[in-house]
Amino acid sequence: MNRHVALLVWSSTLVVPLFFGAVAEAVRGNAPHLPANGLLFWITLVTSAICIVLSQVAPSRVPPVPAGREATAFIRLVAGWALCEGAAFFPLVAWIVTDDPRLLGVCAVDLVALVLLFPSEARWERVLPPDPLQARR
């Protein structure tokens, strides 16, 4: 596992919700819509906020795995990305069934949070667990 693989996976987590949104736009015109529900919007907004916060906090709590430091870094990064990607899908699905355009804004915020989790060299270094060989010295 290395940062280049992480970059590929991060790219796919960003692109898939965008493709899903494009497909949703193409098919939602043919589907009956529920009335825009303020409660669904607020549930979506709160869920997205919680997932964004967790995407920042939870990855560092993933303990080192036996497969090594790079595998641990990769798992930690994927955990954050998955939270943002899942958060981005929820408002898209709610938008399909309600046609509430505010939900697209919630999705956009979730995608920005995912973009901000780009696996730069600095972020990769931050999520690497301590090197046990250096800790012994």
Image (tube, rainbow, N blue to C red):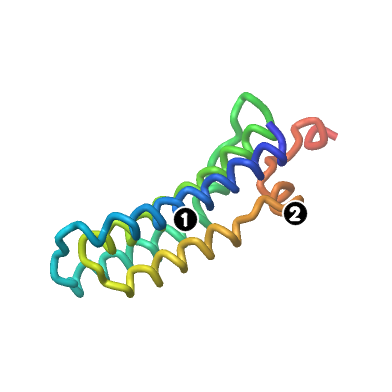
For marks 2 and 1, the one nearer the N-term is: 1
Closer to us: 8 or 47: 8
Residue at 53% x, 52% y: name it. Answer: 14
Where's residue 27, x and y in %? Answer: 29, 55
How far apart are the alpha carbons under marks 2 and 1? 26 Å
Where's residue 8, x and y in %? Answer: 63, 41
Which quadrant, please, contains the N terminus?
A: top right
| Helix, strand or loop at mark 2 | helix
- Give the amino acid type for the residue marked by disc 2 in the picture: Ala
Q: Is residue 79 visible?
A: yes
Residue linked to disc 1: 18
Closer to us: 52 or 20: 20
| Helix, strand or loop at mark 1 | helix
Closer to us: 31 or 119: 31
Where's residue 86, x and y in %? Answer: 40, 51
- Mark 1 Cα within 10 Å, few/some/many (few <14, many 20+)? some
Quarter of the image for residue 64 reads top right
Q: Is residue 84 visible?
A: no
Q: Which mark is residue 101?
A: none
Residue linked to disc 2: 122
